[in-house]
Image (cartoon, rainbow, N blue to C red):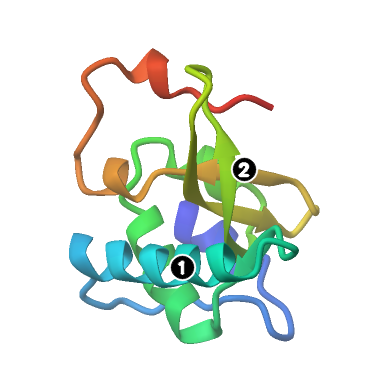
Amino acid sequence: SLEGRTRAAQKGKNIELQPMKVSFETCQNILTNHRNKLERDPANPRSYLPENEQKIVLEALRRHPEAEQKIGVGVKHIFVQRAILDCGSSSYCFFVKREDETEEDFSYRWCFGMKFRNSSHYTWKR
């Protein structure tokens, strides 16, 4: 199970899953705060979330339609970084860094059932 794999992958300072109430607005505020921090410091490409924010965003990620794929072997860190979209624009989004050191972006909007009308327009470039 998703929860079992995430707990099994946790060691040391890794994120623990705790049942909690999480909202779209809370995730939006976390992303906005880290985006603002990155915009003030362009030399810094990413902003790692402190543990309390990581727990909130991880709880939201568990609701994502592709949660098992996004979480994979377990989440080591969650951070905010700018991503380039296929349409040529850019957007800040959450990323997970997994236990195996792989990274993947995810949209908190999808965690709350909100999808873009033309989702292919918003595919991340790698």
| Residue in front for this viewpoint, 25 or 1 | 25
Tell me residue 2's x, y (percent): 48, 52
Label 1 residue SS:
helix
| Residue in front for this viewpoint, 54 or 90 | 90
Report whether residue 17 is seen: no
- Name the residue tied to disc 2: 104
Residue neighbourhood size for the residue with mark 2, other residues' Cα within 10 Å, grouped as few (<14), some (14–19), many (≥20): some
| Residue in front for this viewpoint, 90 or 55 | 90
At a point 54% along the width and 38% down the height, the residue shown is: 69
Q: Is residue 77 above or below residue 62?
A: below
Q: Is residue 82 left or right of residue 100?
A: left
Q: Residue 83 is drawn in which quadrant?
A: top right
Q: Amino acid at mark 1?
A: Asn
Q: Is residue 50 left or right of residue 3?
A: right
Tell me residue 118's x, y (percent): 28, 15
Q: CA distance from mark 1 to mark 2?
A: 21 Å
Instruction: Please state, as top left, top right, bottom left or bottom right, where the C terminus lies in the image.
Output: top right
Q: Is residue 71 above or below residue 21?
A: above
Q: Amino acid at mark 2?
A: Glu
Q: Is residue 12 above or below residue 32?
A: below
Q: Residue 11 is drawn in which quadrant?
A: bottom right
Asked if the residue under mark 2 is in contact with the one under mark 1, i.e. CB atoms within 8 Å, the reply is no
Label 2 residue SS:
strand
- Name the residue tied to disc 1: 36
